[in-house]
Amino acid sequence: MPLSDFQTVIGLEVHAQLLTQSKIFCGCSTAFGAEPNHHTCPVCLGMPGVLPVLNQRVVEYAVRTGLALGCTVKPTSVWSRKNYFYPDLPKGYQITQYDQPICEWGELVIDTPSGEKTVRVRRIHLEEDAGKSVHDASASAGQSLVDLNRAGVPLMEIVSEPDLRDADEAVEYLKALRDVLVYLGVNDGNLEEGSFRCDANVSVMPKGSTTYGQRCELKNLNSFRFLKQAIEYEAARQVDVLESGGKVDQETRLWDVNKGITRSMRSKEDAHDYRYFPEPDLQPLIVSDALRDSQAKVLPELPRAKRTRFMGEYGLPAYDARILTAERPLADFFEACAAHAPDAKKLSNLFLGEFSRLLKDEGTPLSALRFTPAQLGELLATVEKGTVSANAAKDVLGEMFRTGRAPADIIAEKGLAQVSDVGAVEAVVDDILAKNAGEVEKYKAGKKSVYGFFVGQVMKAMKGKGNPGLVNELLKKKLGD
């Protein structure tokens, strides 16, 4: 059977580093980018005789995430030791949660070409991150270095059910989950730095079957593009294996970015291979009603709900609403500006166009803008009234970015105000038509393309300051349209 006769089945295990200032079981900093092994202590280095002390903020963030995803927050969960040996795991085991995680059975709704789809979230559990192996070209041949700054950074693992059916759905789920975590303030969503990454469990089965095939785990995918490419390649590989009469082995595979293939890393371990047992140095984790209620009170409006509201309240198309709500600070600033703007759609056009360009080119974060939402609303109002043209408004906005000055002051200083006096504009229109009588005859004879010539000549004579609406109105009147 060809690939089109098979159904891909995908589940994602998302690993999100929590935005705490210190690690999960010690006071070391979680700041990214420090010199190797600089943010370490006897606890996260796994020295004998040390004891872990749980970071309360980690628990708060996990509860907040569970509530946002509609999970059951367990009153009691248990820490376990997951035993395996790897160079960047200093203790030889990882403190995690196994059979009793902190949150279970939630869901996340995503958009697909066929409509909304609900993806079940099986569990959320907490654990400590491992260190990082560094394959440094300056090291001796065949050697790798170990950086343990990341060891002990709080990690939240969010495991979905195998409800995703193609690579595009998997990417959409990962993007939607990232947006939720960033909105909640529990994760920075940075895939490049590895603070938000995922493993994908991929299998194939004949279409119409209800029996899942043997899955393979694709490890540590840290971009949406790599996730899509890896899943599509792996599904095709498994179909080729089955079609040739072979058997798909349960294994962990890596995505080779340079070759565009998945390759075997190791045979996939089962739970018993890790010899899980309750962590003897930590008591069971108790989530009180008070803690749960405190996190419920700080839940923000989530991206999907905000997007729906933007479409209804501001009359925005889905495309605009999706971009404007992708990041919480941008959505908040848009709403602050909308309170002063005469037209929400025109404000959205400005945000998606010139405003976004200036943010990027000027390198200015939203928190450092020099002008206020009221000033941006004032600028849009001047365009709406015909005081300045849309092009002139771009110049004004650029100056507002750089100086924070009021739009009216900038318009006056730069002489950007449009001429909207009917008499003044009409005099110029009459003069242009009189000087170009031949072109007028061509227009009246049916050569309508000449109209743009008249507009250009009028605007040139007025040095670009003629009110375009008034110019067009008078030209059409004079030409008999």
Image: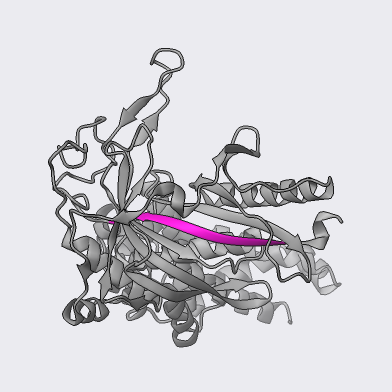
Magenta stretch, residue numbers: 7-18
The stretch drawn in magenta includes residue 12: yes
**Image point (80%, 55%), residue name:** 3
Asked whether, in this view, residue 117 is left or right of residue 381, the answer is right
Asked whether, in this view, residue 365 is left or right of residue 307, the answer is left
Position of residue 370 measured from the top left corner of the image (x, y, whole percent): 24, 59
Position of residue 66 measured from the top left corner of the image (x, y, whole percent): 35, 72
How many numbered marks are there?
A: 0
Quadrant location of residue 186?
A: bottom left
The stretch drawn in magenta includes residue 352: no
Q: How are the colours assigned in the image?
A: one colour
Position of residue 424 measured from the top left corner of the image (x, y, whole percent): 49, 73
Quadrant location of residue 55?
A: bottom left
Quadrant location of residue 106?
A: bottom left
- Whether residue 466 is situated above or below residue 240 in the rendered picture: below
On-image quarter of the N terminus: bottom right
Position of residue 350 measured from the top left corner of the image (x, y, whole percent): 46, 66
Residue 424 in sight: no
On-image quarter of the C terminus: bottom right
Residue 274 in sight: yes
In this view, the residue in front, 209 or 338, is 209
**Image point (39%, 77%), residue name:** 71
**Image point (72%, 77%), residue name:** 479
**Image point (25%, 46%), residue name:** 152
In this view, the residue in front, 140 or 186, is 140
Secondary structure mostly seen in the magenta stretch: strand
